[in-house]
Amino acid sequence: GCELCGSSACAGCARIAARAHRPSTVAPAIKRLVGTAPALLSLLHQVEKVGASDATVLIHGESGTGKELVAEAIHEASGRGGPLIKVNCAALVETLLLSELFGHEKGAFTGAAARRRGRFELAEGGTLFLDEIGDISPRTQVALLRVLQDRTFERVGGVTPLRANVRILCATHRDLRAMVARGEFREDLYYRLRQVVLEVPALRQRPRDVPVIAAAILERIAAERGTAPKRLSGRAISALSRHAWPGNVRELENALRAAAIFADGEVIELEDFTANVEGLRDLEALEPASAPMTPRAGMLPAIPAVEPSSGPRSSAPERAEPESHPPSAPVAPSAPVAPSSPVDRTPLELAYAHVRGGVSLSDMKREIERECIARALDESRGNITRAAVLLGMKRPRLSQLVKQYGFGGTSED
């Protein structure tokens, strides 16, 4: 059955899984929500299901995760004929926000020289997206609650009820449940807003999506500038995939935009990022391929090194559970480990040590495959045919893997 919904044949999940390789007719928002992590596929599956409904949706996630894109995707999937109107609730003071949402009558306040339609009227027949909903004042909460309950509102300074034919989507990075407990957010409004709750995963929760996200961003940057897309070196991909990205996809995009400017050629090297992303140079985990690094603030936890047993291996080794640490905190081993000299450790021993440290064998094989492909593409300057010769594999298979791992800036000839 479907891993997301349990159905034996789920057409919705099949459409979502195919979107990474879909032609450009895909809706823009969905096309930019790229990746294959289970958390992202689950989110897109939910978007697929709630899109056609009129349910009020609360989109929750850290800053920079793409909550606005999720709102756009829901609107695009809804088939509503009206527009998508966006309001950043944190950017306006209370009086201006009320006027922005509901409009005002002439003379309602100083400077109101004419009647003005609000966002609820402008979104007629469409969708109203309220970003940073956790920042609205108690007075605005009351006004919004009335709209959700009665589907009517009045302009500021007016007395005539107006009908609200809009779908409301909200987003926040705040914990609204905790705000309700502290008396900072109305409980009745909270439950009205959360008919459906969608969680947008942080980028650090899906590090294997970083290469394909980066490739998509670089293609977008190239399209904006009218140039050929730049691509990332293997070292850069390895480091970017391990960075914690507290600013999530927005931070990654800003870093890539700056690095694309500093890069001298078509390949963006790790050094092109060092001035823009703090601590990124510390993430050169694969150079040299010796003893593991000590993780630092801003890094994802490194894989602990475990020395292979010197005794006989009559039975399968017991897998060590990886210790859980916050991504932003330094990680230290519980007891000092004195690894032997890297010269004395074969690649097989190093790989086995990582598997003993909690990495699955299938993940290890994928990491080795991806790194070998990245280095072959570096050596062949992005030429897939020459890289296939270096790797001793058929070109169609390598071309398939290049797409799977999200390497951009390649050529077939």
Image (cartoon, rainbow, N blue to C red):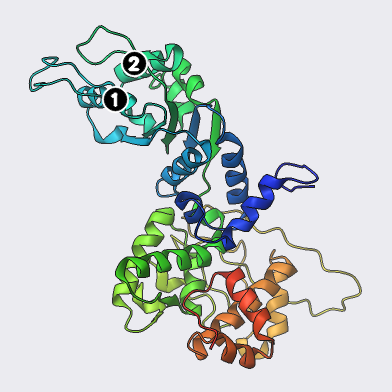
Toward which corner of the image does residue 97 lie, by quadrant? top left
Q: Position of residue 83 (x, y in %)?
A: 38, 35
User: What secondary structure is found at the residue carrying circle 1?
Assistant: helix
Q: Residue furthest front?
A: 81
- Residue 152 against residue 98 in the figure, above or below: above
Please name the residue that numbered disc 1 is placed on: 101
> Which comes before the other along the chain, label 2 or label 1?
1
Name the residue rendered at 69%, 66% in the picture: 359
The answer to whether residue 290 is seen in the rendering is no
Percent of width and height locating residue 51: 55, 36
Image quadrant in which you'd find residue 404: bottom right
Q: Nearer the viewer, residue 204 or 198?
A: 198
Mark 1: amino acid: Leu
Image: 233 above or below 70: below
Local packing at callout 2 (Cα closer than 10 Å; few below 14, some 14-19, many 20+) is: some
Quarter assignment of residue 85:
top left
Closer to the eye: label 2 or 1: 1
Left or right, residue 369 beside residue 162:
right
Q: Is residue 167 above or below residue 233?
A: above
Crowding at mark 1 (Cα within 10 Å: few <14, some 14-19, many 20+): many
> Could you tell me if residue 162 is visible in this image?
yes
Q: Residue at x 12, y 21 (%)?
A: 114
Amino acid bearing label 2: Ala
Residue 203: percent from left, percent from top: 50, 55
Q: Which residue is mark 2?
A: 143
Residue 75 position in % (x across, y down): 47, 38
Asked if the residue under mark 1 is in contact with the one under mark 2, i.e. CB atoms within 8 Å, the reply is yes
